[in-house]
Image: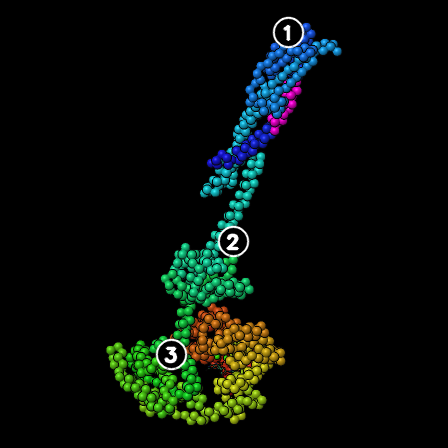
Amino acid sequence: MLPLRKRLSYQQAKWALLLVLFLGSIVSVAQIVIDWQHEQKHVDARVEKILNILKDPAIQAAYSLDRQLAAQVISGLMKDDAIFEAELKDDFGGIIARQRVAPSDDHLGWLAELLVGRIIFFSTPLIVEPDLRVGQINVWVDGAIITSDFVSRSIRVLLFGLARNLVLGIALLGLFYVLTSRPLAQLTQQLKQLDQQARRPKGLTYLDGHQEDELGILVETFNQVWASRDQTESLLAEKEAYFRAVMEQSGEALILADLEGNILDVNAEACRSLAYDSDELVKLTLADIDANSSHRSIVIWVRAIEEGRPVSIDSHFRRKDGLVYPVEIRCNLVTLNGQKCLLASIRDMSERRKAEDRVHYLAYYDDLTKLPNRRLLQNRLELTLSVARRHQHIGALLFLDLDRFKMVNDSLGHAAGDELLALTAVRIKGCLREEDTAARIGGDEFVILVPELSDDLSVAQNLVRQLAQRLLVEFSLPFNIRDQSVYITVSIGISLFPFNDATGSDLLQQADTAMYQTKAKGRNGYYFYRAEMQTHANERLIIEKALHLAIENAELSLQYQPQVNAQGELSGFEALIRWNHPTLGRVPPDRFIPIAEETGLILSIGRWVMVEACHQLLILQAKGLPKTFKRLAINISPRQFADDGFVDEVRDVLRLTGADASFLELELTEGMLVKNIDAVILKMKTLKQLGFSFSIDDFGTGYSSLRYLKHLPLDLLKVDQSFVRDIVWDSNSRAIVHTIIAMASHLDLALIAEGVETDEERQILSKLGCKNYQGYYFSRPVNAELLVSLVGHRVEFPLLRVESIE
Ligand code: C2E
Ligand code: CA
Ligand code: CA
């Protein structure tokens, strides 16, 4: 309840009253002034009137000098209480009669002095005939008495006015209360209740008697606004509900944060994966759960989103319990209440990373013995070899093959065989130092890589001999398998490096050869490989020299290996280079391409391949390509792709030949893509604009990391031959191929399996989800003439008898 003095009615009444008082006072004052003027005249008239009445007796008394009459006249005058002295004089100024009383008190004297004078003197001559003057009457009037009459009258006027105004004020207060304050208070009460009630009423109700006045209009206007607010609110509520539903139904964790990183909202999935309650999360910032995010990184994300670039960040989140797990964050900007916010959707990458690690493990390790496999060994071997060359120290490769392992397998069963292999691995490792590598490269074949023995050849030989002997001794002890003592021996072949430029595979080959020598000589022993190193080095020099003239002398040619789809229809070709030298004969590409790389000749050879392939494409097109045909693939070597002029070179070839790049595919290898990834992406994008597509050759043997693959504009993965080769008997290879196929489909890439040699391989691949193939089973590489005839007819693969003329 409002206190009285704050109420509108009181204020209105107060001001009205003040105004009335003010105006009333002015009126009263004016009234008094007029009254005063009137009073002045009245005094004169009054005295004159009395004098007039008494004039005749006075004349008579003065004329006859009748003192008695004179005294009566004067007494008559004195009856007027304003007159305090009067006298009647004869013609000569002698006093006939006179009376005087004391004038009144002095308390209004000052006012009388101001208004009329303290004492007013009247004198009237007594005249009988025009010239006969008989005497004179003098009268003294007391001004104070007159004034006091006037004052009391004035006070009455003022008091009455005041009383009237007060009554008026109270009446106004009541009136205003009834007309204004009370209805307003009622409306206020209604308004208060509006927001408190659970079921929202439609609005205010009209007040009795106020339907059509301003209050009525107020209620009406308010109700309209209220209705539209209600509508907006329910619209907002619907939107909010929709937003929440979208957030909650998303399978991904969603976090809404402001641009400072403060978390504003989260969905249930985010709470679940971070192990927080939502109340706790909304008190945190992004930096609290993601060590990599900061204000700066948020600014960078926002800029990227605004420039239309997709923002996808690999990061790590920290759960409430401290556990850190890998995530992929994708960000969007949303505007809420006029404020820009980040909506981050978070994908838990733990499973994916595990799968990647698993693929990596399967690709590089042997699951049975947990040792590195052939692939990892080869990588390490190349690396070791180059280090040994640089530092001029000698290392060794030992090839171990268990003697008569097959017998163990056959007699005790596969499981026992597997157990034996696992124990063999343990025993081999027991003989090695930390820096040595033991690998399992085949059924019962193991390889030991000793990176550094000595700088001196004879010392190195001695050391490796000791190692071999130690291994033989270790193997002379029985293996305990299922409570049985199993005896097995091992044959070892040793090659030393680095000598001349034997490659890793050369060294393996040499150690293998030496091992066979051991077997031939009765097993359970070791042999060194002794090569005529000089011959090898010479051969390399000869090749290098001859290669310089290969293009000029038209010794190079291309062959084309068909690629087929699931229905066995032609989907493309891979162009493969051939070199036929007059004296060296056919030099395989594996032999001369690395030399061309090293010497830089690959640049001109690569260009030649491209021009040749483009010409061939035009010929095929003229002949009419089948509908199923997609692309002609060209191998690009790392040095070629890395060359600054590569893109220009490619453009030049297109211009020169007029070939249509959308029918061309460039085969790259993983190794050449991971370095300088930004420059690589730029190069690939430029080429893509020209129409080219891209495939990754020998996929699975290199880095096999999706982390960079997803950033590249790729079209196709070519599963490496080595997996296909082992797919029938090796479950690891099957698992790898299976995972690669899943990855490819996840990344939206096409996939082709290379080196398919048998129908069995094709069937297994097909079951794993592979739909494109290349390999001897379908067709060997064919020369240009045969190629034209392949395109001409609607052939189906595998071909029965189209062999290459190699
Ligand atoms: P690559 O790119 O992996 O080519 C596939 C190789 O596998 C070819 O060997 C092909 O003849 C062979 N191949 C195809 N199907 C089968 C099969 O079913 N079983 C087996 N065992 N092998 C099969 P090729 O022609 O000897 O080429 C070897 C490598 O030389 C190529 O491997 C590629 O890396 C390189 N190369 C060939 N031509 C060129 C070229 O024009 N430029 C460049 N830079 N490198 C080339
Ligand atoms: Ca290739
Ligand atoms: Ca390949």
Closer to the camera in the image, 727 or 311: 311
Sequence-earlier tag: 1 or 3: 1
Q: Residue 228: x, y in percent? A: 54, 45
Q: Residue 125: x, y in percent? A: 69, 13
Q: Residue 435: x, y in percent? A: 36, 81
Crowd around label 1: few <14 · some 14–19 · many ≥20 (10 Å)? some
Sequence-earlier tag: 2 or 1: 1
Q: Is residue 525 left or right of residue 720?
A: left
Sequence-earlier tag: 3 or 2: 2
Judged from the image, the secondary structure of the residue bearing numbered disc 1 is helix
Alpha carbons under labels 3 and 2: distance apart: 58 Å
Residue denoted by label 2: 337
Judged from the image, the secondary structure of the residue bearing numbered disc 3 is loop
Residue denoted by label 3: 372
Callout 1 amino acid: Arg
Label 1 within 8 A of ligand 2 by Cβ: no
- Residue furthest out toward the right: 130
Callout 2 amino acid: Asn
Alpha carbons under labels 2 and 1: distance apart: 114 Å
Is label 1 or label 3 in front? 1
Judged from the image, the secondary structure of the residue bearing numbered disc 2 is loop
Residue denoted by label 1: 67
Q: Is residue 679 left or right of residue 487?
A: right
